[in-house]
């Protein structure tokens, strides 16, 4: 009997998924989710274009230099050196720009002071050195490094944690999961499901899985494209180093896994919220704030959020430098990390609690479109 | 297993608004019509019967099944609602097929059943078209097809004849009768009282959320004491007959038909009146026909609810 019932339930879940997939993927009201998912990919595509352009300029500067330079040569320039010393060290700059600044006199008796500025640009083919001279003396130096694995990995982690997960996946799940029941109430078509010989809980599971399949397809694809775009901008030799010797592949797999877990966690939250609230803005704001203030919450409460576990699973920590504000530093830091198995289990438990609440709520739901 | 649809002291409130109040019903097989003006509680009663809304108080059971157990309830029940919305993007065939797949049918049996029921409601030509392009009558028929697709024992139909042309109406009425003749329960709500009169085995009259009467129409009519029963008699000497009737004090009002071949009588005791009439017929008054003039749904509705909302 139980096996028979399970077989029927599974057939019903598949029927629900088939119906929901069509609506979830092609609904006009969900088109913005594709835009949100595409935004981080566009960020990395823009980064590739900018990097390529910069690399092109850097190569030009290196080629136009009087002699080939190394990165160590660029580091040898120090503030206070004279222009002659710089030229002696690195040769005539490939690009230079001269301009004069006139400072007004301090008193009426004084004369205006003229300061001669020279901006030199050197390159070793990968990194650029910008030297600012005032009256023939080095005032400041700025080295813009080309491809830097460490820096770029942190940038990727930043985009992933603060834009992709906290905003794109969050709002994407909101759009898809809240509409699973709420959208049907607004369309006045929920009774179609409620008139079928199907347990409400089975219907809820079918809808959740349909939403999960849709969000995972959209956001895992987005994450894959981001990874491809991110890796693409490395020179081939560095790409191999990153992927095979610097945990690049492992990190990519973890990011995909975290994306799926984010869809599970936020999906379960928004499914129950969509059944309990008529207006999605209120629960969305509450969940968004709850997730945002997570670092400031006591340990017991922290555990009832998704971001707490997702942060613990992210493979790259974002360091906060000395200039970072304390609030931002707290947001970035993971002061009380949990182990990966605990984090995965934590998200699944939080999702199961939300799904249990959904199952209670779906049994209570009534068809009363006139009150909408 | 119970063989009735049972409402036990059922009330439903939508916040402060009354849906139905203190409803006690035991509905037998056959065609039962829910009759009442807009807002009287017909749809609420149907939604309670099908578990789409839950009672605020009381208990509803359909042939022994609880209404909060859709998995079992909808194996024996089909509901054609008044909600005129469908899942987006589906053709008529997909709508029925998906419903049957949701019911757990396999691909082949769902397809077979879907085509069979689409044929039954005469929608074969339009089955592959998107429902969004259907006329009101076609949408009504596809909803009906969904309700009967799995051969339910209980068929609940909210205004099922709305939007149908006369031919389709008579086809649907024939379908309801055939279903009821198989021992099924057909619950219909309708504004169109003459159709209710023609098809119903019993009626439930609702007003302002209360059941004001239930049962067979003639029985309900008989219980309305404040309105005398009207009887139309066709005979050759209506004036003589009228005089005799008034003498016997059984008729309280008599009016002669314009053609002088009939009369309309009002009496408070119809049974005694018919006995007396038999006696008079034996005594030489030539009576062609006797017919009750107000034991139809329309009259009952007018007496109990008022005629403002009645649709003839």
Image (cartoon, coloured by chain):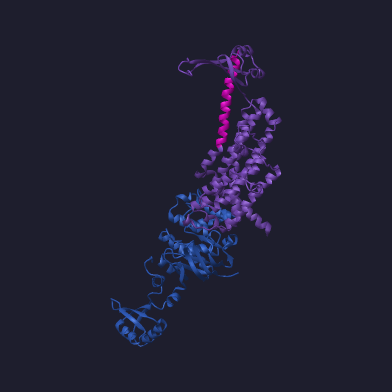
Q: State whether the magenta stretch is mostly helix, strand or loop.
A: helix
Image height of B223 relative to A266, above or below? below
Q: Position of residue A201 (x, y in %)?
A: 61, 55
Residue A60 in magenta stretch: yes
| Chain ID for blue | B
* Magenta-tinted stretch: A38-65
Q: Position of residue B190 (x, y in %)?
A: 44, 64
Image height of B31 relative to A96, above or below? below
- Image-based side of B229 in relation to B15, left or right: left
Q: Count of labels shown?
A: 0
Image height of A231 relative to B297, above or below? above
- Image-based side of A337 in relation to A24, left or right: right
Residue B213 in magenta stretch: no
Q: Position of residue A77 (x, y in %)?
A: 63, 17
Nearer to the camera, A257 or A5: A257
| Chain ID for purple | A
Residue B263 visible from this viewpoint: yes
């Amino acid at each position: 009997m139980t096996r028979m019932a399970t077989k029927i339930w599974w057939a019903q879940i598949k029927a629900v998924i088939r119906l929901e997939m069509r609506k979830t993927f092609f609904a006009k009201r969900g088109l913005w989710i594709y835009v949100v998912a595409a935004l981080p990919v566009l960020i990395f595509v823009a980064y590739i274009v900018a990097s390529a352009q910069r690399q092109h300029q850097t190569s030009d500067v290196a080629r136009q230099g009087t002699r080939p330079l190394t990165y160590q040569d660029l580091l040898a320039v120090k503030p206070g050196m004279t222009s002659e010393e710089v030229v002696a060290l690195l040769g005539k700059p490939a690009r230079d720009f001269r301009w004069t600044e006139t400072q007004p006199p301090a008193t009426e008796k004084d004369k205006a002071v003229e300061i001669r500025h020279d901006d030199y640009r050197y390159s070793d083919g990968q990194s650029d050195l910008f030297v600012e001279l005032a009256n023939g003396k080095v005032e400041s130096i700025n080295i813009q490094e080309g491809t830097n694995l460490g820096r770029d990995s942190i940038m990727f982690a930043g985009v992933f944690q603060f834009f992709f997960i906290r905003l794109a996946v969050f709002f994407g799940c909101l759009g898809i999961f809240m509409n699973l029941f709420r959208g049907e109430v607004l369309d006045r078509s929920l009774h179609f499901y409620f008139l079928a010989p199907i347990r409400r809980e089975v219907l809820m599971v079918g809808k959740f899985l349909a939403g999960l399949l849709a969000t995972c397809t959209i956001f895992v694809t987005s994450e894959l494209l981001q990874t491809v775009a991110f890796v693409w901008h490395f020179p081939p030799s560095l790409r191999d180093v990153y992927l095979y010797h610097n945990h690049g592949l492992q990190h990519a797999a973890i990011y995909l896994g975290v994306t799926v877990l984010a869809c599970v966690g936020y999906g379960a939250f928004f499914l129950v919220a969509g059944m309990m609230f008529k207006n999605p803005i209120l629960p969305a704001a509450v969940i968004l704030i709850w997730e945002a203030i997570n670092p400031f919450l006591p340990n017991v409460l922290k555990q009832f959020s998704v971001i707490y576990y997702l942060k613990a699973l992210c493979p790259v920590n974002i360091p906060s430098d000395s200039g970072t504000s304390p609030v931002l530093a707290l947001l970035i830091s993971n002061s009380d990390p949990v182990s990966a198995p605990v984090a995965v289990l934590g998200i699944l438990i939080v999702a199961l609690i939300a799904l249990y609440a959904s199952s209670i709520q779906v049994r209570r739901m009534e068809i009363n479109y006139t009150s909408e | 297993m119970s063989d009735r649809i049972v409402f036990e002291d059922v009330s439903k409130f939508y916040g402060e608004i009354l849906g139905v109040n203190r409803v006690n019903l035991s509905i037998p097989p056959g065609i039962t019509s829910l009759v009442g003006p807009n807002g009287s509680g017909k749809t609420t009663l149907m939604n309670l019967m099908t578990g789409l809304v839950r009672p605020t108080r009381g208990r509803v059971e359909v042939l022994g099944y609880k209404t909060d157990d859709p998995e079992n309830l909808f194996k024996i029940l089909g509901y054609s609602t008044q909600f005129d919305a469908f899942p987006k993007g589906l053709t008529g065939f997909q709508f029925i097929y998906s419903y049957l797949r949701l019911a757990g049918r396999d691909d082949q049996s769902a397809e077979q059943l879907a085509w069979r029921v689409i044929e039954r409601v005469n929608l074969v030509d339009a089955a592959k078209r998107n429902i969004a392009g259907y006329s009101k009558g076609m949408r009504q028929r596809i909803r009906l097809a969904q309700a009967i697709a799995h051969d339910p024992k209980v068929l609940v139909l909210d205004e099922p004849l709305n939007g149908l042309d006369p031919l389709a109406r008579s086809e649907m009425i024939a379908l309801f009768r055939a279903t009821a003749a198989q021992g099924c329960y057909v619950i219909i709500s309708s504004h169109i009282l003459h159709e209710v009169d023609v098809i119903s085995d019993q009626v439930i009259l609702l007003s302002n959320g209360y059941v004001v009467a239930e049962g067979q129409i003639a029985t309900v009519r008989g219980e309305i004491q404040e309105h005398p029963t009207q009887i139309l008699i066709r005979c050759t000497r209506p004036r003589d007959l009228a005089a005799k009737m008034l003498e016997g004090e059984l008729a309280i009002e008599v009016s002669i038909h314009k053609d002088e071949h009939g009369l309309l009588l009002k009496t408070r005791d119809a049974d005694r009146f018919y006995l007396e009439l038999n006696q008079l017929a034996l005594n030489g008054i030539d009576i062609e026909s006797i017919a009750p003039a107000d034991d139809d749904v329309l009259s009952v509705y007018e007496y109990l609810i008022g005629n403002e909302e009645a649709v003839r």
